[in-house]
Structure formats: structure tokens, C-alpha cells
Image (cartoon, helix red, strand yellow):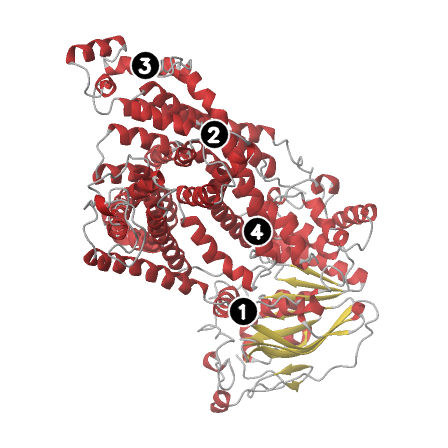
Amino acid sequence: MAPPPDGVLDPDAPTATVAASRWPGVARYAAARVGQGILVLFGALTASFILIHLTGNPATVLAGGQLPEAQVQALSHQLGYDRPLGVQYVSYLANAVHGNFGTSFRYGTSALSAVLSALPNTLTLIAVSIVAAVVISVVVATASVLRQGGWSDRMWRPLLSALQGIPDFWIALVLVLVLSVKLHWLPSLGYTTFSSLIMPCVALTLPMLASFSRLLRASMLDFTDSDVALALRARGLTRREIVLHHAMRNAMVVFVSYVALQAGWLVGGTVIVETIFAWPGIGTMLIGAVQARDLAIVQATVVLVAVAFTLLNLAADLAVIWLDPRIGRERVSGR
Amino acid sequence: MAEKRRSAARRIARPRLGSGSLTAGLILLGGMLVFSIVATLASPSPTAQDLNHALAGPGPVGHLLGTDALGRDVLAWVAGGIRTSFEVALLVVALSAAFGTAVGVAAGYLGGWLDAVLMRLADIQLSIPPLPLFIAASAILANNMLTLVILISIVGWVPYARLCRAQTLVLRERGYVAAARLAGRRRATIAVTHLLPGLTTEIAVLGSLQAGIALLWEAGLSFLGLGLQPPYISLGFLMSQGKEVLAQAWWVATFPGVALALLVVGFNLTGDGIRDLFATGTSGGIR
Amino acid sequence: MTAALAPAADLSSGGLRVSGLAISYGGTPVIGPLSFEVPAGASVTIVGETGAGKTLLLRSLMGLLPAGFEMIGEVYVSDAGKPLRTAAELRAQLGRHVGVVLQNPFQAFDPLRPVGRQVTEGVLRRKLIGRQAAQERAITLLRQMGFDRPEEVQRLFPGQLSGGMAQRVAIATAVMPDPGVVLADEPTSALDAMLRVRVLGLLREFAGRRGAALVMISHDLSLAAEFSQQLIVLYSGRVVETGPAAELAAIPRHPYTRALLACTPQVSTEGKRELPSIPGSVPSPLQPRAGCRFAARCPLVIERCRTEEPRLRALGGAQVACHVAKEDGAGTS
């Protein structure tokens, strides 16, 4: 992109106003992201609706082939599944906006409240795992960059590649095997004490560690390889100073976005680990609902996960706005 | 140019990490494939149940890796599972790459409202956490290979689209593309003959990495009882069996996990290796 | 091929002397050897086409050669007090006795922090002066660089500056520690013509005022001749001609120097003239070659040129590495 020409070099020309406020630009950026978030939610709602109706009348699914035809019809009418699809869609959307996904026949309460009661447990799992992964990967990546070129640096890539390939549920199983079954150190089921958190979080953290460290390290190295780093070096900054005070900050912008993405995926992605540990979160709830064909819970879960993901992403966007001063700032010309 | 020469010099000077990854990855994958073929030939059928020898530990007597609760031979199952995994990986990558590339190139080359709509769609889709949807879908739809492959591809196509779009935007400014257009070639032809070759390396890298991810998805779903169930032979399924008997028979869950991990690592290394092979050096910096 | 050293100028203030600087890669000599001396307040420009190794040379003076390259020779930075031989010793001078201005003004700053902080960062981290003093000096320097509202400029982020503004701030940053030597790698290549003159003027002003030595790199011979007192013409890593700028510009003796001068686009009132160019391209300094490296493109080449590498010899007021060149510059058209 060619830079705009410098202002006319007339010493008597009035100087341009320097640096307008960044907030209008930020507002535009934020509005765009919020708009995107709304579209995502809309997409999730639609996907969930399509899913329920994919094989025809959902009442048939609910019945599971165990009810006589007449009762299926009655059920279908009772739940409103015999209305035209368009009408159902609109009413579904309207209900969803009010948080009404129907009643769970297993829990007896509204689907939304059932799912919401299980949500905090999953969130705890995610929060602890993410924080642990971020802290460790920052330390590891920074150490690797500072120590560039040694044997420890060359070991990282294959090691981390390996770690990234190991499925989290397998790690969970091995942990349960070793720490619970063989050594009896940690409880293997449920959310009873604080130590119950350890194994599931380790299982979730390890694969994330690999991708986080690699990304952060690569981003920081991109910076230290750049001409900007050369210019900083030419000013007398040591490599250490450049890595800690400049490379890190520059790498954070991409890193934070990625972490938020991962956290969001985790909201729906803890299912398998939760199943292994019988963790009372939305993952276990979803599996139970699927097996019992509790469609209300299934829908509520899918939508709630999308909402959580969207909110997380918005939070990440705010963080990026704070971290990256370039957003909202245009080029200034003049003297 | 001084920059290019320095980067060439630097590439020579730097130790060849790249080729190591590629060789390691390919050896790993090749080895697994060979192992699975040999093991299948040397073992009983994976689905054969033998309740007399249920939960036998690993040992040299007929069941090298032990048996599960129904007496099925773990080694045979792992070998079969490896082949199933290769099948899944291949199909998923083929489908998602084909679809994603088509979308990406179309968006990048044709631009305009098509680009905007497609990319918006991709962004939205990527933003919806897929696992709950997968789970729900698996429960409602049939549990066969086709459904699974389609499901995973539905999530998997977006990275290809993004990549191809970005690359297409760059490549379409190149002289030879403009020349072909001036010569009157149809845009579809240009897309295939001029743009595609420039994309193959990147697609190969992405494909390798996505293969690993696809395997993890499949194993996870099968583990939950939703993906590939018998008569399909899935590593994930065996792991779920292993979970039930974890205290008594650790081998049932452990070995398929090891195999799965090795496969994913193999694909990751291969992808990294291909990327390194075609990496461009940089000129500035303080490395 | 060491040029005979002129009697040492007074280097007690700024100033630079380079002796026998040579860069090799994996044992193969790539650049040099070259020796030159820049007294305080004066400047030398190293001229050559892209690919001749000019930037590599500069980086060796900074002590920041890429991996695999080695340098020998001695660099004497007067303010440092002792001759410097290793890359580490040279690096230690950065931001203290040696200031550097690089080619790309848009890549001279961390995009995430305001430029004001970055102007003072170098001297503050090295604890050369206190925060207050650094702030005042920064404002003074920015004013000298032509900004009449330096406080506001300091608050801007690098992405908000135009090319000319960024390069002027970069120069201010480079001279913050009051260095005795300033290295500049094609500092005006990214700028338009009007700015070029202005920026070079700023550099020259600083050098003169402070008594610093200026080492510039350029591909534009005529601009360099106007700006510097000394010229070193580099071709494929070898010095082909060196001497006082006025002399080289008036009587270019090496065929390459002559060709470079002719290549400069000039506004001509004589009607249209074809812009001459030198056929072929610069061979990579990494490729070993017998004889004169310019032989393949030289209009005056003789048999001896292909087998024997010419050494620098005195011709008139300059030093020329050519078998064919004559003192009066004749025959080199």
C-alpha cells in the first residue's frame, strides 16, 4: 500500500490537525463485531431448528418408535409440530428470544433453567483449564524465544506436535487409570472437592498447551525476524528487551483472539471429558438428553453454547481493542 | 537483491528442521499402515467374540494386546481401526478440500456480493461450536461412514475456503492470469489451470493438519456411542469399551489411544514438513 | 587491495575509521576488503546496485550480520576509544556511539506504541540520561527535524505517520544518544524527491553541528556525489573505485562508475534521450569468479580482465580497481 504523500512543504501552510479521537473508529469496529455475533446466534438457532426437523416430524423422534401412531399424532399436535414449517420457525425464534425452549420431560422444569443450572460447572472447568494453559504456554514460549537456537529450542516443535495429536479423552482415561484406579490419589467421578478438578483440567489443558505455545512462539518469532526488530536493535535495545517489551505485546493480539476461540469451542467441547468424569456440566446433560431424546434440552444446550461462544468472542474483541492501538486510528498527514 | 541472497544464505545456514518433520511424519504414517495390514492378516477377525477369553491381558499367546469384555482381540481391532481411520481421514479431507477450495476460489476470483455472502456464511458457521450439533445430529441420523464424513466435512471446509480465497486474491493479480483472460479463456478454465496449481502446496499442508483433526472428531463421536459403531471398526469405540473396564483391563482403552495419537501426530508432522519445505526465508530481524 | 590510508584526521570528536573490513560466508570471501576513514562532520557514501552487498556491509558495521557470515577487520569508532573487532563489540555501540537510520520508515517502529515513547526508549533503557532530560531532548530534536508541534507528534502511533514524517522521527531517534557515527541505509529510497533533499539535509546538518561521521548507503551516484565528500563504489562486493566525491563525479575512471553516472534519470532540455542501462545483472558476491567481476558487462573488457582481478591503484585523486582505466578517464564511454 503506497503511503500518502507528505503535506506540501510550504513553511507558511497551516498545519493539519493531529490525531482525531479513536473512539468513532472503535465504535464502528465494535458494532461490526456485535452484528456478527447476532448473525452467529441466528445461525445457531436456525441450525438447531433444522436439526430437529431433519428426519421429518420431531414427534416421531421423540416417540422413538415406541408409541402407536395415534399417540404420536396427538403428541405432535400438542407440541405444535403439525403446523407449517414456516410458522413453526417463526414461533421457535420468538420463543428462543424469550428463552423458552420448552419443558424437559425428564427434569420437569423449563429446558433453559435445567441447562443453566449445569452451566457453571462446565464454566469452572473451562476457566481453570484456559488459565492454566495460557500461563504455562506464555512461560514456555517466552523461554523458547529467549533461548533461541539451543537444544531445548529444537526439541520443542516435535514435542509440541506430539502433544497436540493426543486426544483429550485419552489423556483423561490414562489419568483416571493411573491416578485414580492404581494410585487412589484422586477421585475419579463427579465434582465433589477441589481436587476433582485436577484430572479433567489436565486432560483439557495439555492439548491446548501445545497449540497455544506454538502459536505464541511463532508470532513472537515473526516479530523478531522482522525489520521492526532490526530497527529496535539498532537503537541499542537488547534482544531480551525486544522480546519481553515488544515481541510479546505484538504477539498478544493474535494470541488473545485464538485463546478466545478455543475457550468458545471448549464450551461445547468438554462433552467427552465430562462423560468420563461424570462431571455435572452441560456436556453430560447433553448426552443424557440425546440418549433420552429430550429435544428441548438438546435445543437449549446448542443455543446456549452458541451464546456463550459469542459472548466470549466479544470479550476477546474488547481485549483486542485495548491491546491494539491501531484500531480506529487513521493515518495523519501534514507537519 | 541483497534481501533474497541473504535469506537464501540463511536458509542454508539454518539446520534443516523441515525435512526432518516430513520424513518422520511419512515414516510414521507408512509404518502404521503397514503394521495394520500385517496385524490384520495375522490376527482373528476383530468382531469375533470369544467369551472364554474375555478380558485376557496382553501376552504372546494368541492375543498380543489382550482382549476386551466380549473376548474381541484388541490387536485385530486396533489394526482394523487404523484402516478405518485412514479411510475417514481420506474421505473427509477429499470432501472438505474439494468443497472448500471451490468456494474459496470462487469467492476470491469472482469477488463482489458472492464473496461477501460466502465468507459471511463461513464465518458464521465457524462460530458455531460444532460438538453439540454433531452430537445431536449423530443421534438423529444414521450411524454410518457417509453421514459421519459429511458431518465432519461440514465443519472442516471453512479453513480451505479461507485459505484458497486469500491465495486467490494474491494470485489473480499475477500477470499470467491477466494474460489468460486477455486471450479469451473462460474464467472457470483459468481458475482450474492457472490458480489451482498455485494452491496445491497450501492445500496439502492444510489437508494433513485437518486429517488429524478429523480423526479426533471421529474418535470422539464414536467414543460417545454416536459415530461409528460395530460393525464399523473404530478406535474410538474400543476406547469406550475400555472405559467401562478400566479398573480390570487397562489395555483395552490404552492401545487404541496410542494408535490414534500416533496417527494424528504422523499427520501433523507431515503437514509441518510440507510447510517447511516450501517456506520462504525472511530478510530482516535479529535472529 | 587495501587502499593506502591517508594521514589520520583528528578523531577526538566523532569520527570513524575502518581498516581491512571483509565479510565472508562459509569461508568464501564475499565483500571487501575495504578501508576508509570519515572525519567528524564529514560523510562517505557507499554506492552500488541492489545486490552488491551494501546492506550487508552496513549490518557488519552494526555487528548484526545474519547467521553464517563472518567479518574480519577493525573498526575504530572514536568515541568508543578502542578498536572494535568482534560483532559483539560493535553491537555494544548501537544506541550509544553509533546511530542507525534504516531504509523503510514504516518498519522503524513498534506499531503498538506511540512514537514518543520509542524515541526516548533507547537512551532510557541504556540509562544514558534521565527521563526528564530525555523528554526535553526528544522535543528539541523533533523540532530540529521540522515538526512544529512535537508534543502532538509524540502521541501519534507509527501507523498514523506518513513516510516522510516517520523517517524524520526515525532520524531523531537515531541521533538521540548523540552518537559520533551515524549509519544510514538508503534513508530516502522510500520518499519522494522533495522529501529526499530535505531529509538528507537534516542528516548533514546534524553531522556538521555535532561533528559526527556519516556513512550512507545509496544506489544513486549523482545524489551521493552532491551529498558526501567521499564515495566508495561497490560492485558485487568489491570496491571498484573510491575517492573524493567531486573527483569521481567529474572524472569517473572505472567503467562501472561511468555507467552508473550515466544511468541517472535527468531532466533534459535536449529532447528525448533513451535512459541508458547496463546490460546484464550483478553477479552474486557468493559466486566465486576469476578475474574482474565486472568483466561480463564491461564495454572495455580485455583478456586480462577475465583472468586477473584488478587491484586498487591510485589514478589522479582517486583509487581505481581496473586494468584499463586511465588517469584522465578517457576511453570509458
Secondary structure under the numbered disc 1 in the rendered image: loop
Spatial CA distance of label 3 from label 1 is 70 Å
Q: Chain of mark 3?
A: A
Which residue position holds label 4? Answer: A140
Secondary structure under the numbered disc 3 in the rendered image: helix
Query: Which is more foreground, mark 2 or mark 1?
Result: 2
Q: B45 or B24, which is in the foreground?
A: B45
Quadrant of residue C233 within the rendered picture: bottom right
The amino acid sitting under disc 4 is: Val
Circles 2, 4 touching at the beta carbon (< 8 Å):
no
Q: Check chain identity for marks 2 and 4: say if they share one.
A: yes
Which residue position holds label 3? Answer: A90
Q: Position of residue A327 (x, y in %)?
A: 56, 36
Query: Which is more foreground, mark 4 or mark 1?
Result: 4
Label 1 crowd bin: few (<14), some (14–19), many (20+), radius 10 Å? many
Question: Residue drawn at (42%, 36%), measured in percent from left and top?
Answer: A273
Which residue position holds label 2? Answer: A122
Q: B238 or A187, which is in the foreground?
A: A187
**Side of A39 relative to A294 (left or right):** right
Q: Position of residue C1 (x, y in %)?
A: 63, 85
